[in-house]
Amino acid sequence: QPAQAQRRFTIVAGGHEVTDTRTGLTWRRCAEGQTFDGSTCAGTVLLFTHDAALAHARDQAGWRLPNVKELQTLIDRSQTAPSIDTSAFPGTPLNWFWTSTPVVGNESYAWVVVFRSGGGVYLNRRDGVTPDGSSVRLVRASQ
């Protein structure tokens, strides 16, 4: 089974992107603010309010903020702190990650995925978890 799990993610673009063979999505390997240094994601993770996260994603040609269902596909419940495949996504911070999905009935909130625990919650779009906001991992359709 571990061989199957390893085949799910294909490392592309010189190690900077990951294609998920199960969903057909390509992800930035590192959280925004980090860069892949050849072995892990290094650097300071950027934190965004929801509006700033959406604006940042729009500025990255071809990339976008994932919806909650897409980001939840990266949760690996066999892993803890972080609950993600760390060979595909090394150095993933235990931060909360914004999605593009607003909370139905209350547009002041949006869904986040928490890789510390593999859960999902919603946050006020102005703040995030901290006054500085939450993290971002960008996605695009595979080319």
Image (cartoon, helix red, strand yellow):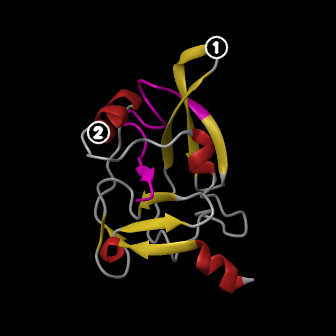
Q: Which mark is residue 56?
A: 2
Task: Give how far across and how far down residue 128 sits, in percent.
Answer: 46, 33
134, above or below 30, in the image:
above
The residues bearing labels 1 and 2 have C-alpha atoms spaced at a distance of 25 Å
Magenta stretch encompasses residue 140: yes
The image position of residue 45, as x and y in percent, is 34, 54
Residue identifier under label 1: 105
At 31% from the left and 48% from the top, the residue drawn is 46
Quadrant where the C terminus sits is bottom left
Residue 101 sits above or below residue 117 on the image: above
Q: Residue furthest bottom?
A: 3
Of the image marks 1 and 2, the number of the one nearer the N terminus = 2
Side (left or right) of 85 relative to 31: right
Local crowd size for mark 2, using a 10 Å CA cut-off: few (<14), some (14–19), many (≥20) = some
Q: Main secondary structure of the magenta part?
A: loop
Residue 64 magenta-highlighted? no
Dot 2: element: helix
Q: Is residue 37 left or right of residue 117?
A: left
User: Dot 1 lies on which element?
Assistant: loop
Nearer the observer, 16 or 45: 16
State left or right for residue 133 relative to residue 117.
Answer: left
| Amino acid bearing label 2 | His
Q: Amino acid at mark 1?
A: Gly
